[in-house]
Amino acid sequence: MDVEEKLWHAQYPKEIPTTIDYDAKALHVYLEESANLYGEKKALYFMGKEMSFSEVSTQAKIMANYFQQLGIKKGDRVAIMLPNCPQAVISYYGALMAGAIVVQTNPLYTERELEYQLNDSGATFIVCLDILVPRVKNVKEETPLKHMIVTGIKDYLPFPKNLIYPFIQKKQYNIVVKVEHGGDTHVWTAILEKTTPNYQQVDVDPIEDLALLQYTGGTTGFPKGVMLTHYNLVSNCQMSDAWLYKTKQGEEVVLGVLPFFHVYGMTTVMNLSIMSGQKMILMPKFDAGDVLKVIHKQKPTLFPGAPTIYVGLLNHPDIKKYDLSSIEACISGSAPLPVEVQEQFEKVTGGRLVEGYGLTESSPVTHANFVWEKRINGSIGIPWPDTDAKILDMETFEEAEQGEVGEVAVKGPQIMRGYWNNQEETDKVLRDGWLLTGDLGYMDENGYFYIVDRKKDMIIAGGYNIYPREVEEVLYEHEGVLEVAVAGIPDAYRGETVKAYVVAKNGYTLSEEVLNTFCRKHLASYKVPRLYEFRDELPKTAVGKILRRQLVEGDKEKQLEESTTS
């Protein structure tokens, strides 16, 4: 692929190409290739259970065959509502082998959210956990769903954990679900016992055919289904592989804490590991203590994550009891990485932690700092191979001057086809192949990019533009602050005013006066928060991104209640 010489290409080390000859292959082909190449090498580790590439490939083919026996056709949608577990990998690749489009579905969805996504995507199949069956059944009649494939965590646990787990599940969720194989309900273990891997191969055009409908978080309005082709996902994996050029094919161990139902975990952990023959450690949820134990015992070398994950580990009281030195490289995404967190984590592990950037609409990665070469703290780094980026003036939409803040726009082979059945929203963000990200940032003289905030999160107080990220970075420097989110809330005099939502570290007592004094040393007076709210925790997405909008909406509801009762 020819690529125009860009300012940031001068920063590339010789080991990373500025352009890549991408494979014209369907995504699932990589599982079959890795099974042929690595055979009995371990592909997955899950709570004591290990599976080889050959086993994963065979079971994915069994699922593909079963989907086809149930009448699935090319382009049909299969919802996968699972945490990180072997079934999440097997059903994903099995659905693709059958020619289907995967619809990743968050297991935490309420019935309302689930019903909306199933109707919008038109999914006719769903693969879900046994404890989610009541939720699925409650919405089934209002959706196009025809078949439900049911599995349980216990299905892939080694003896005696598989016998004990149902009792733990009953205690934890206060639910016992008995599912029988028959009709429109299909039991995972029965499928594996009774089905052969002889599925009918489907002709897939990697460039044109969709592999995935990945729903955005829906922080504004209803979630939108991002249409990603096989080529979108394959190209982003190959870019990632090029960026991590020091890693060895078939030898790395990747920690899978990021959920695969989110595109970040799906690309940087699941798909990249399958493509590169790496062993994945699957963790169904983030628990700092469990993650520390797994790192200590399983010795992962690569650890893609999010700032809140690294913060949780660093502040665990027992962190010094564990050996974390196996970790060599981490790319942090989904939210800004505080410099303090980056430096502390590198000190504890001896590995490298760098910030990257991306969106669901870009499969997801577009930028990152170099893992082993020059990096700039506070920067999202530079565009990946074959990825173009520019800053647009917010009023004229012309390219902004160097160093000027504007909207970040990106272009490349990883950019989505558009939003599913939503041309209006597609037209708002896709222009001549460029994706308008909705993020505000600037580029420096060396081609490094910086995000100052989401366009919709910028605070305008008393005529001043205030970027929450800048204020958050200062607050993170205070030794007593564990987590923080800064947002603008309505103010009769200033239009908006700056509010900080703060979680204190254990053993620290914080006050408005203490933080106010601290901020005034590091920020112009108009940027200093006027209001503080101290909380035990902050609301987050499944990937650990703090839901700033949810905090603001909660405040608006309170203000409305107060005004109606006064």
Image (cartoon, rainbow, N blue to C red):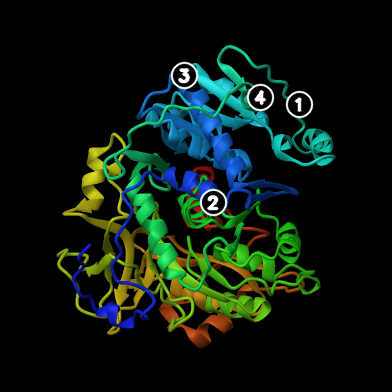
The amino acid type of the residue labelled 1 equals Val
In screen coordinates, is 13 left or right of 519? left
- The crowd level at tag 3 (other Cα within 10 Å; few <14, some 14-19, many 20+) is few
Q: Residue at x 61, y 78 (%)?
A: 346
Earlier sequence position, callout 3 versus callout 4 = 3
Q: Nearer the viewer, residue 416 or 429?
A: 416
Q: Secondary structure at mark 4?
A: helix
Which label sits on residue 142? 3
Which label sits on residue 176? 1
Q: Quadrant of the N terminus?
A: bottom left
Earlier sequence position, callout 4 versus callout 2 = 4
Location of residue 185 (image quadrant) = top right
List the residue tagged with mark 2: 541
Camera-nearest label, 1 or 3: 1
The amino acid type of the residue labelled 4 equals Glu
The amino acid type of the residue labelled 2 equals Thr
Earlier sequence position, callout 3 versus callout 2 = 3
Q: Please tell me whether residue 79 is drawn above or below residue 382 in the rendered image.
A: above
Q: Residue furthest bottom?
A: 521
Q: Pointers 3 and 2 in contact (CB under 8 A)? A: no
Earlier sequence position, callout 1 versus callout 3 = 3
- The crowd level at tag 4 (other Cα within 10 Å; few <14, some 14-19, many 20+) is few
Viewer can see residue 494:
no
Q: Nearer the viewer, residue 274 or 356?
A: 274
Residue 452 image offset from top left, x and y in percent: 38, 71
What's the distance in space between the residues labelled 3 and 4, CA to CA?
A: 32 Å
The amino acid type of the residue labelled 3 equals Glu
Q: Please tell me whether residue 258 is drawn above or below residue 292 in the rendered image.
A: above
What's the distance in space between the residues labelled 4 and 2, CA to CA?
A: 37 Å
Q: Residue at x 84, y 37 (%)?
A: 164
